[in-house]
Image (cartoon, rainbow, N blue to C red):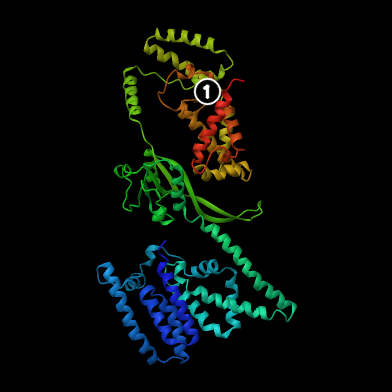
Amino acid sequence: MTRPLPNIFALPLVLYALACWMRGQYKPFIICSGIAIIVFRSELALFLGLLLAFDLVQQKLSIDGLLKIAVPAGVGILTATVLVDSFFWRRLLWPEGEVLWYNTILNKSSNWGTSPLLWYFYSALPRAMGVSLAFVPIGIYLEPRIRPLALSALGFVLLYSLLPHKELRFIIYVFPVLNIASACACHRMWINSAKSAWHSFVALIAASHLLLNVLITIFLLVVSGTNYPGGAALSRLHRLEASNPNVSVHIANLAAQSGVSRFMEIHSDWIYSKDETMNYTQAEMARYSHLLVEAKNKHNTELWTALQDDFDTMEFVDCFNSIGIQYNSLFPVRIKTKPCIGILKKRFKAVNEKKKSKDKNIKDNTKPKQKKDKSKVKIVEAVEEIPLEPVMQEESKLDTAVNSIEPSEQVSSVEPQQELEIDDDDGIVATVEEFSLEVNADPIEVAKEINFQELRNLALKQTTHKSRAATKLKLRKIIEQHFRAKGRHIENDSAEQHKPNAGQRTGIRQSVKSIIKQEKIKEMIEQIATMDLTRVCDLEKTSTKDCLKQVIDKMDEESIKPQ
């Protein structure tokens, strides 16, 4: 947030120096230029030096006159900045001299990133000036008095393009100058508008380009709003944990660089950490209840694998990815985003649950191991229409018979029955439904965390076939995970079938009503796909996933109420 400050501090001095140059007042021009160059930004020597060279070539200023002003002013300015900055930094220092040495002489500015040679011309200038950039060459051609000023600005940008590291803030001084050239062109067109119909048409174009600039500015403002996922993530965490005073959040580098600042630390009882040396070890992560980390990508797969052992993902915050064209909408331009910042919350494990799991493991080890009945849920599906009492009576007889058999015989007697049950075809419809969703879904969309915007697009039918399938597949997974967490069985649940040695006879003993059929899950998905979640939950305080769980519970309660 503070990186553009030196450029902003130098800008008023540059503008005043330019005003003095245009009036022919060379002494204040040289002094203001010296302050801007020596104290704030050394690269201004290229821009302001080119203007000085024009005057020397045209003999408007002599070399002797230049040295009489520049040498005393330069020595005084340099002495002042060294004394002041050395006092505050506790060592002998000329800050802008160190910057010049590091960036230009050592050419290490590329450590902060590089851009193509002509990036300023095809990216920075068009974004900064909009349509006005098209009038700059016209103004240079029509107005001779502006040529030295405009050409010096363009020469400065061209020379500065040789430095690999490029940022928009490095050339903000040329925008007022180029706008002067553009204004000269528009002025000439406007005063000639009465000459002919053609001149009137050209004048209308010159005037209307201001409106186009306003529209471009609004659009770029919307795009810029997606460039601060760190700030959005911390604001979202404040809303989700508004009633929780015991929060200790670690803010990773990407979040700290994209909007998080000290001004956002609004809770005095929270702990905010921006420790850049954190290696995400178990001891380090134990200090935090929440994390704001970069979303999963090919560079941090191992980190996310480690984080998911101890943390649950609350939400992902998207950021700008690219701009696309959409043909089925009134607004043809679409801003594409991608998950950038993950909001993670520590998964607290109760001590009692750990003790119970240990006791259960000890008991299981003392009993003879039996093969798991993988298809008991399917048995219940097959006899769903049969009254419960006969089933329980048959089960009681079966238990008596099984207890009278030796363990070795018991295992062998289960195997044929298991093979017979595996051939059951009750799950074909559900499997085909799920397979169809997986085939049609966009794998990139499926990997993302579900969010309110895609549910809203689904309800408004503003989705493609692949994104619709991906959203429904995510809904199916959330519903199934929620029911599993509540101890409910799901018809033809592949995840349940692959769990080793988990509850050998619970499938038959459980009530038929407690088994969630795939048809019911499908109905839930269709209902949620047409639902407005803002009428059900306060999404400012509740995450999208938690809201969906509330909706699922409500639907489940309504489905089991007596008719």
Secondary structure beneath dot 1 equals: strand
| Residue 51 visible in rendering | yes
* Mark 1 neighbour density, 10 Å: few (under 14) some (14–19) many (20 or more): some
The percent position of residue 413, horizontal first and vertical second, equals: 44, 13
Drawn side of residue 307 relative to residue 556, left or right: left
- Against 92, is 251 above or below? above
The percent position of residue 460, horizontal first and vertical second, equals: 63, 43
Nearer the observer, 171 or 215 = 215
Q: Residue at x 25, y 72 (%)?
A: 92
Drawn side of residue 411 relative to residue 558, left or right: left
Q: Residue at x 39, y 11 (%)?
A: 409
Pick out the residue farthest to the left. 91
Residue beneath disc 1: 515
- Against 85, is 146 above or below? below
Number of marks present in the image shown: 1
Drawn side of residue 266 relative to residue 210, left or right: left
- Of the 4 image quadrants, the one containing the N terminus is bottom left
The percent position of residue 105, horizontal first and vertical second, equals: 34, 73
Q: Residue at x 32, y 78 (%)?
A: 78
Q: Amino acid at mark 1?
A: Ile
The percent position of residue 169, horizontal first and vertical second, equals: 45, 68
Q: Residue at x 54, y 60 (%)?
A: 221
Pick out the residue farthest to the front. 268
